[in-house]
Image (cartoon, rainbow, N blue to C red):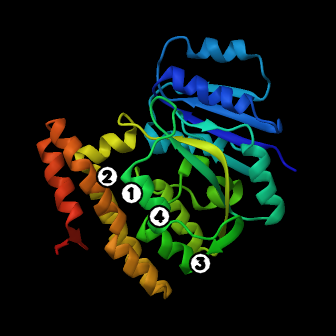
Amino acid sequence: MSTLDILLPYYGDVALMQAAVRSVLAQTDGDWRLTVVDDGKEPGVPEWFAELGDPRVRYFRNEQNLGVTGNYRKCLGLAEHEYLVFMGTDDIMLPNYIANVRASMAAYPGVAMIQPGVEVIGSDGNPSSSLVDESKRRLYAPKQRGRFLMGGEELATSLLKGNWLYFPSICWRTEVVKNTGFRDDVEIIQDLALVIDLLQAGEQMAIDDVRCFQYRRHAVSVSATSAFSGARFEEARRYFLDVADRLDRQGWHRAAKASRLHISARIHALTLVPGALRAKQWNGAKSLLKNATSTSGQPR
């Protein structure tokens, strides 16, 4: 089976990035290639990679900062194998990750996306829980256990009610991601936009509940910062309304309705208001409340 491309668009905390890289080095299945694209200027990072001495690890540093989407696009352009992963800088692959996603590839040849089992951890690396993750698990994620396929309007509706995916853990078929690409009009919810685009194109996702990945949720992440400012929900509102129109034209009316309701965004917004107030981000708190209490841009 083909080598797995692990792409790490890096910016930020050096220690967390190093932990992510070490988790790749610890995989029980060693047929992988790690490509790190550094979008920052932290000292000592190029030297650290040079000292690894592992030919499976490639390191590049951008001359100019490309931003989140720009760096993801550069990483994608460096992928050469059949499947890839966009790993988060602060996430951890458990030792069975590659072996587990290969099992899904074997079960469903040519599948476009694989969502394995994920454990959420906090800044300290210990298991963590939040209203967001509990709502993903209890309200939105499929109740079916084991390994199975989903696609079409069924999966689109489920995700638009509440996005229960963990983007950095998803394994993608390289060809379909390169053909579809990343949208210019979204950044924070780029993951959901890509999945919906692929579903509309007829692709499917393999889902497996075996835990093999740790997703780190903490307050200094890009998504958390944008959420406090309200930018995440302004972007989400625009996207959900646009995709609802596209889904209606495709005849996926249940999915379109779910997109217009965007329930999970409102729940998440309400959980972030107290934090925005503590941070004295008054305008952000107002924006969060507006998004938490509106449907399709109109007051409830």
Q: Earlier in the sequence, mark 4 or mark 2?
A: 4
Residue 232, numbered label:
2
Would you identify the image quadrant in which residue 299 lies?
A: bottom left
Q: Nearer the viewer, residue 292 or 32?
A: 292
Q: Look at label 4 and name its amino acid.
A: Arg
Q: Indicate which disc, 2 or 3, sits on the residue closer to the N terminus.
A: 3
Q: Is residue 80 visible?
A: no
Q: Amino acid at mark 3?
A: Gly
Rounded to the nearest whole Å, what is the CA distance between mark 3 and mark 1? 23 Å
Q: In the rendered image of this protein, does residue 48 appear above or below residue 192?
A: above
In this rendered view, identify the residue nearer to me: 59 or 291: 291
Residue 194 appears at what percent x and percent y?
53, 60
Q: Which mark is residue 185?
A: 1
What is the CA distance from the residue labelled 2 to the residue labelled 3?
26 Å
Task: Please tell me which residue is depicted at 73% across the width and 27% down the height of the picture.
Answer: 57
Report which quarter residue 245 is drawn in.
bottom left
Amino acid on which disc 1 is placed? Asp
Location of mark 4 (residue): 138
Q: Secondary structure at mark 3?
A: helix
Mark 2–mark 1 Cα distance, whole angstroms, equals 12 Å
Q: Is residue 25 visible?
A: yes
Q: Residue at x 40, y 50 (%)?
A: 188
